[in-house]
Image (spheres, helix red, strand yellow):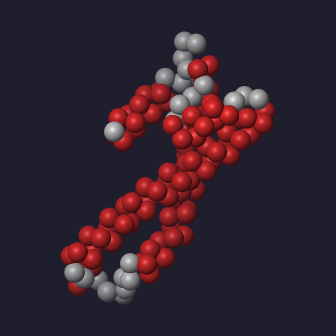
Amino acid sequence: MVIKFLVQAIQNQRNLQPKYYKITSYVGAIGCALGLAFFSWQFENLFAVLNLDTSVPLRQMASGVVFTGLVVMIVSFAFAVYFGAVLVALIFSFFAVLSGRFNVKQAFDYVFLFKYPESWYKNT
């Protein structure tokens, strides 16, 4: 289900006119950069929450602790990047709604569903 959603989102972006493809690429890149900054900021806190001592080598920790820490880090990383992308897309959509380029439904679709206005696609 998630894979199908991501594949559809990629196909939607590839079918955009070049001008709008650039806009969505910039919004996505800025969002991912913001997400990475957020992840790096929370990285130390994740070690504290998991009660991991950063001075102990991984090979000396129990494998269950290492696996749990790895899973939490990966999920946290994915969430941080998604959160950054959604935040930047939300800000972009807010200004697009204020300027009349989007209506509220189009803004919602753009931010959360990665669907674009019909006029953005090629051959429209």
**In the figure, 99 relative to 123: above or below?**
below
At 43% across and 78% down in the image, what residue appears? 49
Residue at the front extreme of this rendering: 105
Q: Horizontally, is 95 left or right of 118 in the view?
A: right
The one of 63 and 26 positioned closer to us in this rendering? 63
Residue 33 can be seen, yes or no: no
At 54% across and 54% down in the image, what residue appears? 83
Residue 49 can be seen, yes or no: yes
Q: Residue 54, how many percent across, how many down? A: 38, 83
At 78% across and 33% down in the image, what residue appears? 99
Q: Residue 112, how many percent across, how many down? A: 54, 41
Residue at the top extreme of this rendering: 123
Q: Horizontally, is 8 left or right of 59 in the view?
A: right
**In the figure, 116 relative to 92: above or below?**
above
Q: Horizontally, is 50 left or right of 93 in the view?
A: left
Q: Residue 73, how many percent across, how many down? A: 38, 66
> The C terminus appears in which quarter of the rendering?
top right
**In the figure, 119 relative to 30: above or below?**
above
Q: Place residue 107 in its image quadrant.
A: top right
**In the figure, 32 relative to 123: above or below?**
below
Q: Report the number of numbered marks.
A: 0
Residue at the right extreme of this rendering: 99
> The N terminus appears in which quarter of the rendering?
top left
At 54% across and 24% down in the image, what residue appears? 16
